[in-house]
Image (tube, rainbow, N blue to C red):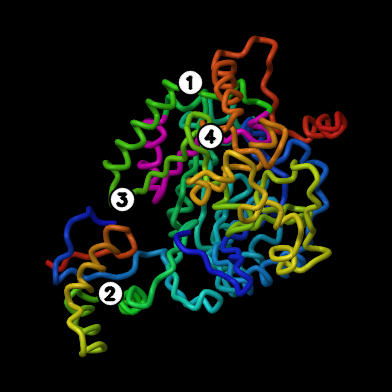
């Protein structure tokens, strides 16, 4: 988003509404960004409740709507929600694995007014794709990619990169070209949720990252005018933190399947914050008034070195969730920043995790069973 | 989408398929929406792009705007904006030949 709207009280309005319709998903991706205790939040909102959320978000000025999850196709009311989104004037984006789609459904979504489909692949070969996703899906995804183009949707192909597929960056780009993607998003894994648990399986080496980045930049030139190549940098390897969510409570509003409203999809885990639920309060109150959405707004919460940093208006101190996960305090500077006194934590993680994990460190796939074990263990 | 090259006066241009131009009451501005993104348009940008919703030549767009704002010589500014908009992928062209 290039410009943000502003309200009379000086706060900005939400522009992006991410509707996480369900945490149910037929895939079990190692890098899933859903909370590891997602099985706690499965009391899903009804269709009527979602429609009210969409209406309130639109009235506040949100223009982009993401239907996400989990796998949003699991919801039987997706076509109804897409129709309401179009009626309200959203640009609606379906963020999907493609599993659960068929021709009748893709046609119905088109007729309802869905604007765009982002289709994920886990890799460019069936073997690796199906391993990373924990389910046999590759052939089905290929068929879905062709249907998306056949029904004249713009297609963003999304591939999350990590140690196990990053060396295939070039082949992934070629696959995107063959499937006539309009955009290819090469998103280096961000270490939240299941990706954090599996970090030793996923963190690439610095050499791998440098090679992939060079290839991505080369293809940005080659595909110019035909396909946009987005390359999301792996923040562990950067000197400065990402401007996470363009700032807390600035443009991004996430509603989890059970109605919990969050300033980002990973914020569940932050302690001491009572995230409001759309069942109990209006989106307007949640966004503008709730203590949770104001907790890290602006700069008053910042500690040194962020408080006096000349770059604080550019990156907002980075990511609150990452600061909490790696340093134990969400108000610390994101330790990805080389100015953070705890930056060594990230450098050590790169050193430790980039060696091939010992045989006794097994990957933990995202599944209900594994999630319940995390819940029982009180994680 | 065509290979990028400078816009010619006879090129037929229009807002790129799957992009949507609409008025936003809350922002009091026109916006251009596309997959996972949005650009908020200032007044002049909106005047130009609202005239590109149907396919027409670069020359036609410039003439329409010159007629709408006869007091200023805006042709060069309009052409420059159209070039930028094309380079950004907001506009697409069909070559007239």
Percent position of residue B22, x then y: 46, 75
Residue that protrudes farthest toward the top in the picture? A359
The front one of A165 and B64 is B64
Residue picked out by circle 1? A205
Seen at 25% across and 70% down, the residue is B13
Q: Counting other residues with Cα less than 10 Å from the Cα at mark 2, is it few (<14), some (14-19), or many (20 or more)?
A: some
On whether disc 4 and disc 2 are found on a single subunit, the reply is no
Picture quadrant where residue A352 is located: top right
Residue that protrudes farthest toward the front in the picture? A308
On whether disc 1 and disc 2 are found on a single subunit, the reply is no
**Residue A226 numbered mark, or none:** 3
- Above or below residue A85? Residue A98 is above
Seen at 31% across and 79% down, the residue is B51
**Residue B55 numbered mark, or none:** 2
Give the alpha-carbon distance from disc 1 to disc 4, as whole Å: 19 Å
- Which quadrant is home to the N terminus of chain B? bottom left
Picture quadrant where residue A169 is located: top left
- Above or below residue A79? Residue B54 is below
Seen at 74% across and 42% down, the residue is A270
On whether disc 1 and disc 3 are found on a single subunit, the reply is yes
């Amino acid at each position: 988003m290039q410009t943000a709207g502003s309200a009379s009280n000086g706060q900005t309005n939400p522009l992006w509404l991410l509707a996480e319709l369900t945490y149910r998903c037929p895939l079990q991706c190692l890098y899933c960004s859903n909370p590891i205790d997602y099985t706690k939040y499965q009391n899903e909102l009804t269709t009527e409740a979602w429609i009210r959320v969409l209406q309130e978000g639109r009235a506040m000025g949100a223009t982009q709507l993401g239907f996400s999850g989990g796998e949003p196709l699991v919801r039987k009311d997706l076509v109804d929600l897409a129709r309401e989104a179009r009626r309200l004037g959203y640009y609606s984006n379906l963020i999907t694995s493609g599993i659960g789609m068929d021709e009748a459904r893709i046609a119905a979504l088109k007729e309802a007014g869905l604007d765009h489909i982002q289709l994920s692949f886990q890799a460019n070969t069936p073997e690796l794709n199906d391993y990373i996703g924990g389910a046999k899906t590759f052939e089905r995804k290929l068929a879905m990619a062709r249907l998306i183009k056949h029904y004249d949707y713009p297609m963003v192909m999304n591939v999350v990169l990590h140690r196990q597929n990053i060396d295939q960056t070039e082949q992934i780009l070629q696959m995107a070209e063959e499937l006539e993607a309009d955009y290819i998003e090469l998103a280096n894994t961000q270490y939240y949720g299941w990706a954090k648990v599996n970090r030793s399986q996923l963190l690439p080496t610095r050499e791998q990252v440098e090679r992939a980045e060079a290839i991505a930049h080369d293809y940005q030139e080659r595909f110019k005018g035909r396909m946009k190549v987005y390359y999301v940098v792996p923040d562990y390897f950067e000197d400065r933190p990402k401007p996470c969510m363009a700032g807390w409570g600035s443009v991004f509003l996430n509603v989890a399947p059970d109605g919990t409203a969050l300033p980002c999809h990973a914020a569940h885990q932050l302690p001491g914050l009572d995230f409001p639920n759309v069942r109990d309060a209006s989106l307007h109150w949640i966004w503008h008034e709730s203590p949770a959405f104001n907790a890290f707004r602006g700069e008053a919460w910042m500690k040194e070195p962020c408080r006096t940093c000349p770059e604080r208006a550019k990156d907002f101190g980075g990511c609150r969730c990452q600061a909490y996960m790696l340093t134990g305090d969400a108000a610390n500077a994101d330790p990805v920043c080389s100015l953070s006194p705890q930056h060594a934590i990230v450098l050590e993680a790169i050193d430790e995790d980039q060696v091939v994990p010992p045989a006794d460190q097994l990957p933990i796939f995202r599944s209900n069973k594994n999630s319940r074990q995390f819940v029982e263990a009180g994680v | 989408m065509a290979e990028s090259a400078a816009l010619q006066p006879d090129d037929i241009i229009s807002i790129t398929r799957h992009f949507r131009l609409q008025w936003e009451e809350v922002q009091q501005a026109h916006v251009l929406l596309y997959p996972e993104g949005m650009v908020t348009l200032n007044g002049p940008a909106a005047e130009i792009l609202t005239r590109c919703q149907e396919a027409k030549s670069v020359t036609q767009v410039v003439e329409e705007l010159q007629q709408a704002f006869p007091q200023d010589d805006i042709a060069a500014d309009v052409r420059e904006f159209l070039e930028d908009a094309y380079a950004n992928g907001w506009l697409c062209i069909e070559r007239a030949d």
